[in-house]
Each structure stands twice: as C-alpha cells, then as structure tokens.
Image: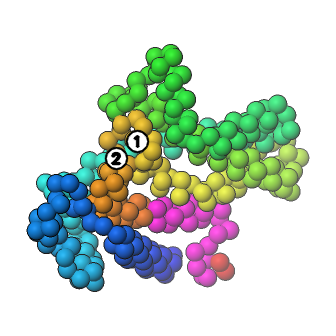
Amino acid sequence: MSTYFLKRIIAMVITLWLIITGTFFLMHTVPGSPFNEERTTNEAVQRNLEAYFHLDEPLLVQYGNYLSSLLQLDLGPSIKKSSQTVNEMLGRGFPVSFELGFYTLILAIISGITLGILAALRHNGIIDYLAMTIAVLGISVPNFVMATFLIEQLAVNIPIFPVATWTSPKHMVLPTLALATGPMAIIARLTRTSMLEVLTQDYIKTAKAKGLSPVKIVFKHALRNALLPVVTVLGSLAASILTGTFVIEKIFAIPGMGKYFVDSINNRDYPVIMGTTIFYSAILIFMLLLVDLAYGLLDPRIKFNKKEAK
C-alpha cells in the first residue's frame, strides 16, 4: 500500500508540474500584453508596469521565479487588481464554488443513481423509458440553456425563486438544478447499464434462488458492483463541479471562482489564470486518487500491490 501511494504521489507531482509548465508557456505565447489598454497607451507607463510585475524579464527567468513562489504556496498578486493576491481571491471564491458544487453533486448522485436503478429494475417498461428520456435531455441540453429555461419559468413567469447572487437558500435552488442536470444524466445512464449487466450475473441468480428480498439483492449485492463505472467518472465530475462551473456562476452572478477566471482571461491577468488552473488541476488529480481508493473499497478483488494480490 505504501509503495503504491508513493508512486501515485510522485506521478501526481509530475503531472501537476507538466500542467503548470504547459499553461505558463502557452499563456505567454499569446500576442499582446495585460497593459494593452487605453489607459496604458503611453509606452513608458507600459514598460514601468511590465517591470513592476517582472514581465520584462526573460521567459525562463519568469518561469523560475514563478516556480520558486509556488513552492512557498504564493500564487502572486493580481495584475488587474494589484491590491489583492491570487491566494485571497481563491480564498473568497472557492468556498462559494464548493458550496454550489457540493449541493449539485449530492443532488446529481442521489437522483442519478435512483433513476438508473429504477430504469434497470423496470427494463423496457414505462419507468425505464421515462428515466432515460430525462437522462437524454439532461445530456443534450447545455446547462446554460437549462439555466435560462429555469429562470424564465421559475423566476419570471412564476416568481418562486430569486435569480442572482448567493445570499440565501432560495438563491441556491436554480443554479443547483441547472448545474446538476448534466451529471445526473451521466450517472443515471451508467448506473442503468451497469445494473442491467450485474443483475444477469450468477451470484444474483443464486441470491434470488435463496429467497432473498429484492431490496436486499439490489442494495447489498448488485449496487456495490454496479457503482464501479459511476465511481470512474465521479472523480472528474466532482472536481469540475466543486471548483465551480464558470458559465452558471456568470449567469446567476455567483461570486465564485468562475467570476475570477472569466475576468482574468478577458483582462489577460496571468497570475489569476495560472492560479485558478493550478488549483483546479490539483483538485482533479486528488479526486482521481480518491477514485482509485474507492475502487478498493467497493471491490475487494482490486489490490494495490503484489503482496495483497496473493
């Protein structure tokens, strides 16, 4: 187990370093400067600003300085909001994005697994067709279209929920619903397909022959193995949801990470772009590690090293 974790940690560090390096150099290959605006048309002013933020130094020197600061967990100051650091901006934005993502993930997992189980148990029945229709719509309709529909129906035509900001439980309903439809549909389809396959296995037939109740067969014997494909996609889904979906946050004026990331791209704010990319990548890599650990818990046949496999 310890050898496995050591290898995974080394692989995670190398992967994150490659992402940092690739993002850094690709970002600086884009023509232009963060100071190419009306208020900085004066060349002397622009040169002074570039010198202040060390953008006039050779690219390799900038890269080395950035890695040095990163090792100290310092993501640097924002270029456009020099009074704020990237650490402070992420510290404000991530809790909001995490809260939205947490509610979305819980809703998507519960509703998706429930729909998948019902569809599998009533295969080729009305419930199956209805559940898969909902899943297809969830996958086909982009979340920003769903957000617009929900706003029109539940905030404008029938003013039940408020639209913008993130100040009360009511404000959380519409963005959570809009964001959960896609992941819910993916989880539902995977659960249904996997459950149908598991229900045909010999050990399920043996459990039925022993007279076990359908509820016990489904939840104690079938569901555990049926969830393995769901766990596979859950890592990347959870990472993307928990760090915030930028479009949904922009539509509902939610002060999460999406706001800072979109603004940083428009303003060419290099430190904020790098900080949000690194933060998202680190969470994604960590979630993939949790997926591997969940495999071992769900399926005892999966071992982490040769000694355990014997």
**Could you tell me which secondary element the residue under label 2 belongs to?**
helix
Magenta span of residues: 284-308
Q: Residues within 10 Å of mark 1 (few under 14, many from 20)?
A: many
Q: Residue at image x 67%, y 80%?
A: 310
In the picture, measured across the screen, residue 4 lies left or right of residue 269, that is right
Residue name at image x 60 percent, y 82 percent: 307
| Residue 225 falls in image quadrant | bottom right
Q: Quadrant of residue 116?
A: top right
Q: Position of residue 302 (x, y in %)?
A: 64, 69
Give the percent coordinates (x, y) of residue 245.
Answer: 45, 47
Q: Residue at x 66, y 58 (%)?
A: 228
- Residue 93's x, y, as percent? 31, 48
Specify whether 207 is left or right of 152. right
Q: Which mark is residue 259?
A: 2
112, 5: nearer the viewer: 112
Is 286 inside the magenta-drawn segment?
A: yes
Q: CA distance from mark 1 to mark 2?
A: 7 Å
- Specify the principal SS of the magenta part: helix
Is residue 249 or residue 68 the one in the foreground?
A: 249
Residue at the spot x=37%, y=69% of the render? 30
* Amino acid type assigned to the residue bearing label 2 in the image: Lys
